[in-house]
Amino acid sequence: MEGNDPQRVDALKAQAPLAESSPERLDSSSSMEGSIASMLRHQVRNMVSHESGLLAGSNGEDLHELRVLSRRLRELFSIDGVYGQKKDTKRLRKGLQHLGQVLGAVRDLDILIESTEAYAASRSRTDLSDFIGALRSEHEVRREKAKKYIMGSDYSRLKESIELLAGRAKKSAEHYPDSGEAVVRPSSVSTILPSVLLARYGYLRAYDGWLDSSGPLRVDRFHRLRIEAKRLRYLIEFFQDYLGPECKPLIQRIKQVQDLLGRMQDAQTACCLIRQYLEVGNLRGKATSGKYEALATQSSLIKYLAARQSELRTCVRRFPSVWRLVSSRWFALRLANLVGRL
């Protein structure tokens, strides 16, 4: 990966942020390849619109939005039978996953710093300052790593590859609806999307019975469920112009599940980092001589850990009632109704 070009960094920081674009509106008879080509280019343009803000570091929203866009793009690449060679989409999904991990490492600390400072302020505590300082130092390291990646050749090639794939999909769509092949395959939005939507909902519902709040706490399963919820939501949002306003209540219900699972994951991340800091005296995972004894007796940090553990247990207790928002017959019937109208 190439290093930062100072002139390029300054140019990107100085440029005016681009307004987020909107993809072309869909029609029931639209080619799925043509529709996805439009969506891919729309997502890449929106990625570019957040790059200068991320590099300037004025706030964490541009980084957060860029991370979300990387996830949304990965979901587009999960739709089979559209892109030709699977090895191309596999490579791009891997690149987008790495981008999400680099940005996610920064975003996790954005959230933890904000929540820790709020906790300290609400209790007028100044004895968490060392921990907050360690969070900020680690945040700066991770943010610089993210900036380096955004300025590097790997990220540039990733965007170029997505644009090239979008171009191929658009060119292929020019032969729609008759590709000249003897075998007729589903190729329109209305013939591909129903099975994709129902399959994605099936992956979400597969967690029924695996998340019993009365049993051992399996935070890893809740985290994977959150990913599945996001994937279903992104898919519906991509096609909401075509699905109609009836899909909005479904999106809102998924968001409520996501929000609770997000708070659960944030609490779990906080607990892990607090324990690490108590054990070794830093957030890098390496023991610091002479720090362990002092840190292990810091009652304020131990109390903060207990507070985040309590928050995690509260989220788990609330989960069954929130889960019913998407596992209910109401949700399933309305999703089926949307599919039936495609």
Image (tube, helix red, strand yellow):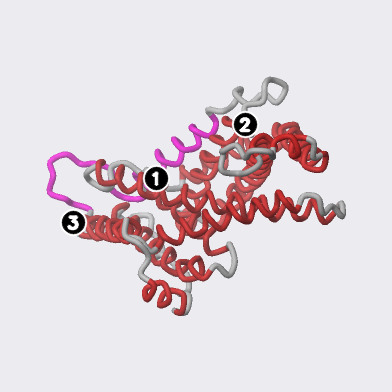
Residue bearing the label numbered 2: 219
Q: Badge 3 local density, few (<14 within 10 Å), some, or many (20+)?
A: few
Q: CA distance from mark 1 to mark 3?
A: 20 Å
Question: Is there any visible trace of residue 106 in the rendered image?
Answer: yes
Q: Secondary structure at mark 3?
A: loop
Residue 311, image x, y percentages? 76, 39
Amino acid type, callout 3: His
Residue bearing the label numbered 3: 175
Q: What residue sits 73% from the left and 51% below the top?
A: 116
Left/right placement of residue 266 relative to residue 148 reads right
Left/right placement of residue 221 relative to residue 267 reads left
Q: What residue sits 53% from the left and 45% below the top?
A: 230
| Mark 2 vs mark 3: in front | 2
Question: Relative to residue 44, is residue 300 depicted above or below?
Answer: above
Considering only order in the chain, which callout, 3 or 1, is on the residue closer to the N terminus? 3
Residue 320 magenta-highlighted = no
Name the residue furthest top: 215
Q: Secondary structure at mark 1?
A: helix
Circle number at residue 277: none
For the record, the magenta segment spans: 177-205
Q: CA distance from mark 2 to mark 3?
A: 47 Å
Residue bearing the label numbered 1: 193
Considering only order in the chain, which callout, 3 or 2, is on the residue closer to the N terminus? 3
- Report which quarter residue 114 is drawn in: bottom right
Considering only order in the chain, which callout, 1 or 2, is on the residue closer to the N terminus? 1
Q: CA distance from mark 2 to mark 1?
A: 31 Å
Amino acid type, callout 2: Val
- Report which quarter residue 268 is drawn in: top right
Amino acid type, callout 1: Leu
Q: Badge 1 local density, few (<14 within 10 Å), some, or many (20+)?
A: many
Residue 199, image x, y percentages? 44, 35
Left/right placement of residue 151 relative to residue 127 reads left
